[in-house]
Image: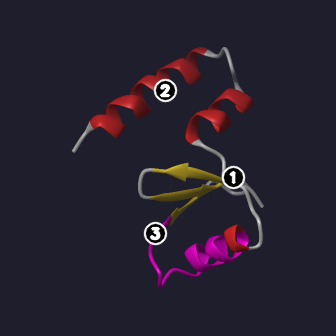
Amino acid sequence: MSYQLTTNGVLRLSDSAFVPQDPANRDWLEYQEWLASGGQVMALNEALEESAPNHALTTLAKKWLGAVARQP
């Protein structure tokens, strides 16, 4: 299983499901177990670079995500 960090949870890459930081969410608990067993979560930019390093959509996504990260 692979996960990618987001601002308020993680993205499960196998099915593109967003998993919020909610201790009552079974997917969040599964993610926490995965981390405890040595899983390595991907940073947001790493996942974008692996999928399409020089693609115009990757550039646009980085700009959008950068703007979102700066919002309060």
Q: Earlier in the sequence, mark 1 or mark 3?
A: 1
Judge whether 28 appears above or below 66 on screen.
Answer: below
Q: Could you tell me how far apart the alpha carbons at marks 2 and 3 are, in whole angstroms?
A: 23 Å
Which residue is identified by label 3?
A: 21
Image coords of residue 44 (percent x, y)? 57, 40
The crowd level at tag 1 (other Cα within 10 Å; few <14, some 14-19, many 20+) is: some
Which residue is identified by label 1?
A: 13
Judge whether 7 appears above or below 22 on screen.
Answer: above
Q: Could you tell me how far apart the alpha carbons at marks 1 and 2 are, in whole angstroms?
A: 18 Å
Split into 4 quadrants, where in the image is the N terminus? bottom right
Judge whether 37 appears above or below 63 on screen.
Answer: below
Q: Earlier in the sequence, mark 2 or mark 3?
A: 3
The three-letter amino acid code for the residue at tag 2 is Lys
The extreme bottom residue here reads 24
Question: In the rendered structure, which segment of residues is drawn in magenta?
Answer: 20-34
Image coords of residue 43 (percent x, y)? 60, 43
Q: Would residue 32 be counted in the magenta stretch?
A: yes
Position of 19 with respect to 14 (left or right) is left
Foreground mark, 1 or 3?
3
Residue at left offset 73%, top offset 31%? 50
Residue at left offset 68%, top offset 68%? 35
The three-letter amino acid code for the residue at tag 1 is Leu
Q: Would residue 15 be counted in the magenta stretch?
A: no
Residue at left offset 47%, top offset 85%? 24
| Mark 3 secondary-structure assignment | loop
As drawn, the label of residue 62 is 2
| Mark 1 secondary-structure assignment | loop
The three-letter amino acid code for the residue at tag 3 is Gln
Q: Could you tell me how far apart the alpha carbons at marks 1 and 3 are, in whole angstroms?
A: 16 Å
| Mark 2 secondary-structure assignment | helix
